[in-house]
Image (cartoon, rainbow, N blue to C red):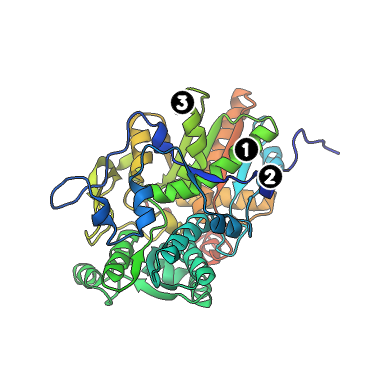
Amino acid sequence: MKTYDTPCKLLLTEDEMPKAWYNVKADMANKPAPLANPATMQPVTAEELSHVFCDELVKQELDDTTPYIEIPEEVRRLYCLYRPSPLMRAYRLEEKLQTPARIFFKFEGNNTSGSHKLNSAIAQVYYAKKQGLKGVTTETGAGQWGTAVSMACAFFGLKCQVYMVKCSYEQKPYRREVMRTYGAEVTPSPSMNTEAGRRILAAHPDTIGSLGCAISEAVEAAVTTPDTRYILGSVLSQVLLHQSVIGLETQAALKKYGIKPDVIIGCAGGGSNLGGLLAPFMGEQLRGEAKYRFVAVEPAACPSFTKGEFKYDFCDTGRVCPLAKMYTLGSDFMPSAIHAGGLRYHGMNPTLSQLYHDGILEARTARQLDVFKAATLFARTEGILPAPESSHAIAAAIDEATRCREEGRAENIVFGLSGTGYFDMLAYSKFNDGQMVNDD
């Protein structure tokens, strides 16, 4: 029988869970550019943002000096429903690849939302409840974020309005029904419910929608509804802050078992999973304490990092949000209907964009067919059906492990398995039937 040099699961206890989120901006010499008012091009103020976001979230968004921000006790108690999440070693995948590399993945799919999104949803809805609000609005691409927000609103007793990208609304009906089961109202976007939606439909009557469209509608709905604020599932600094719990747990587990990663990989859409995973490791590197390779993997059909411009751009298609300096394909970019709905966003988080611009973060693309080949191999070896979004990171991890085999290097590869694919069976069906195309 084969003996393993580390456990299959590198586990933490609840007592070892992080008690504070980590703000990577505090350790950056080159801070990300501030959000800007499109009318004046001046940095947005807390007062301006407070009309859209909860007050405490505005403070977190604008804070680029405080390294650690305490996780409220009520949030930590809800985290304990599904955290700490396991860091696992992919022994069977290693054996299949015949690689000397050791492959580890942080599995975030072990909750009803099926992804890492619940980490920020609980925090953001908590702050909305604490402020005395009655409800929140949001957007969702593949549906994981919408599901997470619906769950969090059920926990705290708030109303939830979700604008779901139209192609995902049609591709993933069961994800929609999970949201409705938790009490959310779900609307396909763009819709006729908002001025932004009506403008987009007038200009693009046959559009399949995008995250940029859905953001515009959700923001408009928030600012026109009393006692309601908007919450976002990616892109913003506050979201990366909350998602740092992923990286902090990963860092703690690796240290507990005496393992130092060589390369850290995450899928990249707006940046929440990627930023959360790499944050504490990036902090070590920025402080000169360690050296790693950081790799972002994005869809070839929506390549914000690799083909976008680093400039100020609107965060949404309807142009109702502030400007962010980021790598962007343009706020009017309409990506093709790839099945990784959560990665179909035109821009990238400003912090990650600055790190990429400074050469600290690498980026590469993956084509849809290659992604599903990697997903299928992972499912057949590790027994977990991965989300299409997460499978971008799997594809890159396989490439890195193959390189290690060819070079004879026993590196430690860590990637984020940000969610499961059990609501993505239409995509797997098309792949299995040979009907999937690359769309790039």
Q: Nearer the viewer, residue 67 or 250?
A: 67
Looking at the image, residue 191 sits to the left or right of residue 389; the answer is left
What residue do we see at 32% from left, 34% from top?
Answer: 31
Quick check: 202 left or right of 79? left
Q: CA distance from mark 3 to mark 2?
A: 26 Å
Evaluate if marks 1 and 2 touch, with contact meaning CB atoms under 8 Å apart.
yes
Q: Position of residue 348 (x, y in %)?
A: 35, 46
Label 1 vs 3, first from the N-terminus: 1
| Residue 142 percent across, percent down from the top left | 45, 62
Q: Residue at x 40, y 68 (%)?
A: 132
Q: Is residue 162 visible?
A: no
Q: Which mark is residue 12?
A: 2
Circle nearer the N terminus (1, 2): 2
**How many residues crowd mark 3 within 10 Å: few (<14), some (14–19), many (20+)?**
few
Rounded to the nearest angstrom, the CA distance separating label 1 from label 2 is 8 Å
Q: Give the amino acid at mark 1.
A: Ala
> Which residue in the protein does label 3 denote?
287
